[in-house]
């Protein structure tokens, strides 16, 4: 069992910034991938950014140059710094991880989601 706890969402004006955090706990021997997805109202969930254990990063085209993903392996945490926020960034943001336990069994886990609202 892997638990993910997110924090950092909220209301921000267009052009503003927010930093999301996510911490993982539970039966974790290694974390292969940590990432963020989002789901705008009435739309499908989409990848925002992901980062592997070796530091390889993927961003959605819509957030490149504005968002920065980072991770702290010692803290089993991933962060998403969001700058120059736009109304279209408003969504529920979900942390997700691909982890392996001591028996090399894989778990794909999701956080509960944190709301990001961008509005003046």
Image (cartoon, rainbow, N blue to C red):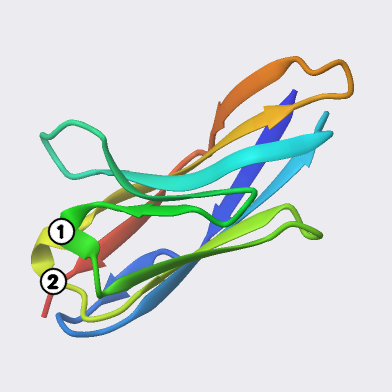
Tell me the distance, in whole angstroms, between the alpha carbons under discs 1 and 2. 10 Å
Q: Residue 107, position in %: x, y? A: 65, 21
| Residue that protrudes farthest toward the right in the picture | 102
Which structural element holds mark 1?
helix
The residue located at (25%, 34%) in the rendering is 45
Which structural element holds mark 2?
loop
> What number is the disc on residue 15?
none
Q: Residue 8, position in %: x, y? A: 48, 67
The residue located at (81%, 24%) in the rendering is 101
Query: Would residue 37 be found to the left or right of residue 57 on screen?
Result: left
Query: Would residue 38 be found to the left or right of residue 97 on screen?
Result: left
Residue 19 lies in quadrant: bottom left
Q: Nearer the viewer, mark 1 or mark 2?
A: 1
Instruction: Give the residue at mark 1.
Output: 62
Quarter of the figure that contains the C terminus = bottom left
**Of pointers 1 and 2, the one earlier in the residue sequence:** 1
Query: Compared with residue 40, is residue 110 higher up or lower down, i.e. above or below?
Result: above
Residue 44 lies in quadrant: top left
Query: Would residue 82 be found to the left or right of residue 8 on screen?
Result: left
Q: Residues within 10 Å of mark 2 (few under 14, many from 20)?
A: some
Number of on-image labels: 2
The residue located at (78%, 59%) in the rendering is 75
Q: Of residues 4 and 77, which is closer to you in this image? A: 77
Q: Residue 64, position in %: x, y? A: 24, 66
Q: Residue 72, position in %: x, y? A: 69, 63
Quarter of the figure that contains the N terminus = top right
Residue 27 lies in quadrant: top right
The residue located at (18%, 84%) in the rendering is 15
Instruction: Give the residue at mark 2.
Output: 86
Q: Residues within 10 Å of mark 1 (few under 14, many from 20)?
A: few
């Amino acid at each position: 069992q892997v638990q993910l706890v997110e924090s950092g969402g909220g209301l921000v004006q267009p052009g503003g910034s927010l930093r999301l955090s996510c911490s993982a706990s539970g039966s974790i021997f290694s974390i292969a991938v940590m990432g963020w997805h989002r789901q705008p109202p009435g739309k499908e969930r989409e990848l925002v950014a992901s980062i592997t254990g070796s530091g390889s990063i993927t961003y959605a085209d819509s957030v490149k140059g504005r968002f920065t993903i980072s991770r702290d392996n010692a803290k089993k945490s991933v962060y998403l710094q969001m700058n120059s926020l736009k109304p279209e960034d408003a969504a529920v943001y979900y942390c997700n991880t691909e982890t392996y336990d001591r028996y090399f069994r894989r778990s794909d886990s999701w956080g509960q989601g944190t709301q990001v609202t961008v509005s003046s």
